[in-house]
Amino acid sequence: MIPLLQSPESLTAFGESSDGIDTAMELLAHRRRRVVLQSLEAAGGSATLTELAVEIATQEATAEPNAISDHGDVSARDRRAVRISLHHTHIPKLAAADAIDYERETETATLCERGRALLDRDDAIRGLGNVE
């Protein structure tokens, strides 16, 4: 059974064409982009690049089932690697798709309506089961 969505418009937010669906799925394909969108939503809509990098590095460090971690346990090297990845790959892709606004001067990302539509689509996919 396909789960109900809060907003049926979210299914067509990227257009009904296969290109729109492909774009949405490509954006959701990488875990770091999904976490950026989820983190922005949880933070009230905006966060700095550093805040996002720390959050993602922490999640990745605690991906081991028996690991107990907080931000202090994540190495500076891991945070820097995630930050570079976000800066050069994931943030530009999300910004190009108008899922986020990114202010280079302040290094602040802000969630846009298209980003919220992607989160709705991600929630719908997760509702199908066996999806991380």
Image (spheres, rainbow, N blue to C red):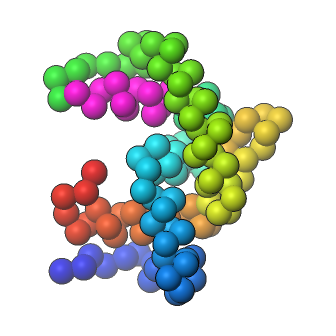
Q: Is residue 52 left or right of residue 105?
A: left
Residue 70: percent from left, percent from top = 37, 19
Residue 3: percent from left, percent from top = 26, 76
Q: Is residue 101 left or right of residue 118?
A: right
Q: Magenta stretch: residue 62 in it?
A: yes
Q: Nearer the viewer, residue 84 or 115?
A: 84
Looking at the image, residue 73 lies above or below residue 35 = above
Q: Evaluate whether residue 50 shows in this view.
A: yes
Which residue sits at x=55%, y=78%? 19
Residue 27: percent from left, percent from top = 51, 59
Q: Evaluate whether residue 47 shows in this view.
A: no
The magenta span reads: 54-64
Which residue sits at x=67%, y=45%? 109
Q: Magenta stretch: residue 116 in it?
A: no
Q: Residue furthest bottom?
A: 16
Q: Is residue 71 left or right of residue 65?
A: right
Residue 81: percent from left, percent from top = 53, 25
Q: Is residue 51 left or right of residue 2?
A: right
Count the labels in the image.
0
Q: Residue furthest right?
A: 105
Q: Nearer the viewer, residue 19 or 117?
A: 19
Which residue sits at x=42%, y=69%? 121
Looking at the image, residue 94 lies above or below residue 65 = below
Which residue sits at x=32%, y=67%? 125
Q: Quadrant of residue 67?
A: top left
Looking at the image, residue 120 lies above or below residue 72 = below
For the N terminus, the quadrant is bottom left
Looking at the image, residue 88 lies above or below residue 99 = above
Query: Mostly what secondary structure, the magenta segment?
Result: helix
